Amino acid sequence: DQQVKQNSPSLSVQEGRISILNCDYTNSMFDYFLWYKKYPAEGPTFLISISSIKDKNEDGRFTVFLNKSAKHLSLHIVPSQPGDSAVYFCAASPYAQKLVFGQGTRLTINP
Amino acid sequence: DAGVTQSPTHLIKTRGQQVTLRCSPKSGHDTVSWYQQALGQGPQFIFQYYEEEERQRGNFPDRFSGHQFPNYSSELNVNALLLGDSALYLCASSLWGSDYGYTFGSGTRLTVV
């Protein structure tokens, strides 16, 4: 039972353009959503999060959008930089409980 | 300020053996969670420890057990290893009751042969 899904295993974007990573969830009890970035041989690094009471959160080049009615969230990176190339995981949490992760999307930024 | 430290970084074990993985949480954190990441998948929650007690558990068999020490460090034990236990095991520390602020270690790569 995959409660958090990232349907795109990979995404390739030109440097300087916008990267959009998508995530869908099924559990209405999730009230907090996070994005993590992972480089090879390293643990996931927290990127940005959003509470279920908001529909947008911005931090520099990164913006997360939450559409609760569609149970969908997205991460926008603009402008994309070569250092953004990594695997991105969407995660969801029912209040202060475990994190439920998606399968990840490998983002490649091309020069 | 040290982050989350996991040891060892790599481990090779034989089917049927037992393994112990170790985790030291980030300074100031009191809660430790363990995750298993199989190849090509996202991390899956194993269990969470706070105040030396298991507080939550994911869908993992009893072969997976853990412990938390008074200094908040933690161990993950896996008995009767199966080939399917081969994965990256991640430790994450946090403050109890916090939705955010999970800090992950670099993981232990376990290979069962």
Image (tube, grey):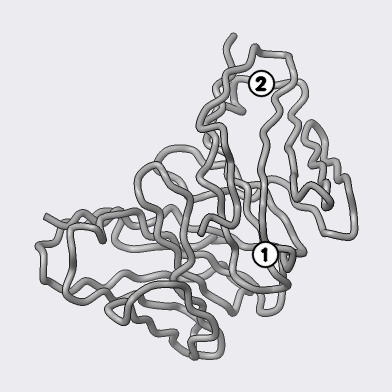
Task: Return the chain for callout 1.
Answer: A
Name the residue carrying label 1.
A93
Q: Earlier in the sequence, mark 2 or mark 1?
A: 2
Q: Residue at x 43, y 53 (%)?
A: B106
Nearest the eye: A69 or B113:
A69
* Residue for point 73% across, 47% down: A48
- Which image quadrant for residue A95? bottom right
Q: Nearer the viewer, residue B69 or A37?
A: A37
In the drawing, does residue B110 fall left or right of residue A80?
Answer: left
Q: Amino acid at mark 2?
A: Gln
Q: Quadrant of the C terminus of chain A?
A: top right
Element at label 1: strand
Q: Is residue A75 above or below residue A29?
A: above
Please tell me whether mark 2 sits on a helix, a strand or a loop: loop
Tag 2: Cα neighbours inside 10 Å, few (<14), some, or many (≥20)?
Answer: many
Q: Position of residue B87 (x, y in %)?
A: 31, 54
**Residue B27 figure quarter:** bottom right
Q: Subunit of mark 2?
A: A
In depth, the one of A17 and B7 nearer the eye is A17
Mark 1, other Cα within 10 Å: few <14 / some 14–19 / many ≥20: many
Q: Amino acid at mark 1?
A: Ser
Residue A10 percent location from the top left of the image: 52, 27
Report which residue position mark 2 lands on.
Answer: A81
- Please, is residue A70 above or below residue A10 in the view? below
* Image-based side of B87 in relation to A56, left or right: left
